[in-house]
Image (cartoon, grey):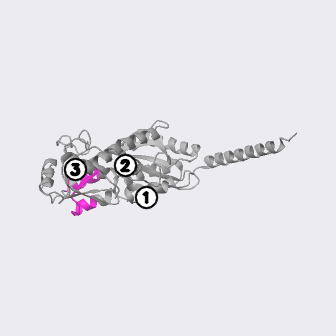
Amino acid sequence: MQSNEPLRLTASLLLASLLSVTTIAMAVAADYPARPLRLLVPFPPGGGVDLLARLLGSRLGEALGQQVVIDNRAGGGGVIATDIAAKAPADGYTMLLGFIGPLAISPTISKLPYDPVRDFAALDPLASSYHIVVINPSLPARSVKEFIALAKSQPGTFNYASSGSGTNLHLAGELFKMVVGVNIVHVPYKGAGPAASAVLSGESHLLFGSITSSMPFVRANRLVALAVTSPARSPLAPEIPTLIESGVSGVNVPSWYVLVVPARTPRDVADRLRSELRKIAANAEFREQLARQAFETRNLAPNEFPGFLKAELDKWGKVVRAVGIKPD
C-alpha cells in the first residue's frame, strides 16, 4: 500500500509557503508607505493634467506622510507614461494619473503595449473638465461662425493644435471638422502646454484648450475665445458662448482623469490609497481648488472602473471609426 506521506509533506510545504507570502504581504501593507511614491503624469508640465496631478500629489503626500514625486513622461499622446505604469512593480509605489486619451481613445485607434482594462486598478475619485475653443488673434475671426466661414474660404490653410495623436483634443478637433465641414490640419504636440504655446506664438491657429489656463491669455488679448464645449456656459468665463449656442452640436469630448495603480497591487495597499483619496476628494477646500480650475469630481463605486472604462472604449471607438482617425 502506497504511503500518503509525500502528499502530506507537499501540502504542508504549500500551506507554509502561502502563509509566508500572506505574512509578508501583511507586513508590507502595515509598513506602507515606507518611502516616497511616484506619480506618473502622461504630459509635460503646464497643462491641466499636470496641474491636477500636483494638487492631488501634494494632498496625498501630506496624508501618507511621504513625498509624492511627480514624474512627467510626455509622448505618444500619453501612451508612454501609461505603458511605464502598466509594467511598474505592483507595490503601491507607482501611480499614474490615468487620462481619457491613452486609456479610452488611443486603444481604439491602434494596438498598444498595454490593456487599459486588464492592467490597471482605479483608486476611485474621477475628475472631469470641459474645454474652450481659442484661436490666435491674427486670424480675422471673432466667433465660431466667422472662423468656419474663414476656414471654408481657404481649405487646408489653417491648422489646429492638440496634446498629441489619439488624445481627446485630437478627437475634438476631428469631430469639429466633420460636424462643420471644414478642412483644417491636425498638428500634434507633446501635451496641452506646448499646444497652447504654439497657438500663442502663431505657429498653430486653433486649440481646444483648458478654460483656466487659456482665459488669462484671452483677457490679455493674446488669444481669442470662440466658445466653450460644456453644455452650459462656464462660471469661469460666463461671457463666452457655448458651441451649441454658436450653432455647433456634437463636439463634446470632455477630459476625465483617474489615479490608477498596476492591477496586481496588494489589496490592502490599494485600499489605503483609496481611503486617503476619498477623504481628499470630500474635502471642501480641495473641491473649491478644483472648481477654480474647472474640474468636477465624483467617486466611482467599488469595482465600477472596469465597466466604466469598457463603456468609454465602446463610445469613443464608435466616434473614432465615424470620424476616420487612423494610426499615425
Q: Could you say whether the residue bearing mark 1 is in a helix, strand or loop?
A: helix
Task: Identify the residue position indicated by label 1 in the image.
Answer: 80
Q: Is residue 297 left or right of residue 324?
A: right
Residue at 44 percent of width and 57 percent of height: 81
Few, some or many C-alpha atoms within 10 Å of disc 3 (few <14, some 14-19, many ≥20)? some
Highlighted range, magenta: 196-220
Task: Identify the residue position indicated by label 3 in the image.
Answer: 177
Task: Specify the quadrant that holds the C terminus.
Answer: bottom left
Few, some or many C-alpha atoms within 10 Å of disc 2 (few <14, some 14-19, many ≥20)? many
Q: Position of residue 223 (x, y in %)?
A: 20, 56
Residue at 53 percent of width and 49 percent of height: 64
Q: Nearer the viewer, mark 3 or mark 1?
A: 3
Few, some or many C-alpha atoms within 10 Å of disc 1 (few <14, some 14-19, many ≥20)? some
Say which label, 3 or 1, has the lower sequence index: 1
Say which label, 3 or 2, has the lower sequence index: 2
Residue at 70 percent of width and 45 percent of height: 18
Q: Is residue 142 visible?
A: no
Say which label, 1 or 2, has the lower sequence index: 1
Q: Is residue 199 visible?
A: yes
User: Label 3 vs label 1: CA separation?
Assistant: 28 Å
Q: Is residue 272 left or right of residue 284?
A: right
Task: Identify the residue position indicated by label 2 in the image.
Answer: 105
* Most common secondary structure along the magenta stretch: helix
Magenta segment: does it hold 200?
Answer: yes
